[in-house]
Amino acid sequence: LILIDLKMPSMSGIETVRRIRQMPFTQPIKIIALTGLDDDQIRKDCKAVGIDSVLTKPLREEQLRPIVVLARTAVSSLT
């Protein structure tokens, strides 16, 4: 599971994910983007680079908990 903020100082989260997804072994890894803006274009851009979910900040525990549980379950099934 990768949590990434879309607004970072030296490279955008979208560009970072684009580079991560170029590595074939990262395909099964779930990537969740965090953003302060809830915008349709941002969601489209995220989907285009392989981001699985977009959560709007401020983040609440109840938003993140089910995603973490699913990610942990997926990892457990691999071992």
Image (tube, rainbow, N blue to C red):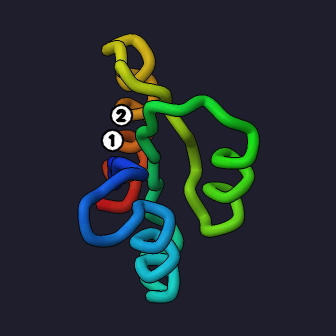
Q: Is residue 1 visible?
A: no
Q: Secondary structure at mark 1?
A: helix
Where is residue 75? Give x, y as percent. Answer: 34, 53
Where is residue 65? Give x, y as percent. Answer: 36, 22
How many angstroms separate mark 2 from mark 1 (CA)? 6 Å
Q: Residues within 10 Å of mark 2 (few under 14, many from 20)?
A: few
Disc sitting over residue 54 in the figure: none
Q: Amino acid at mark 1?
A: Arg
Classify the position of the C terminus by image quarter.
bottom left
Q: Amino acid at mark 2?
A: Val
Q: Nearer the viewer, residue 63 or 7?
A: 7
Mark 2, residue position: 68
62 with respect to 51 (left or right): left
Mark 1, residue position: 72
Residue at image position (40%, 72%) is 16
Q: Secondary structure at mark 2?
A: helix
Residue at image position (48%, 27%) is 56
Q: Nearer the viewer, residue 60 or 13?
A: 13
Q: Residues within 10 Å of mark 1 (few under 14, many from 20)?
A: few
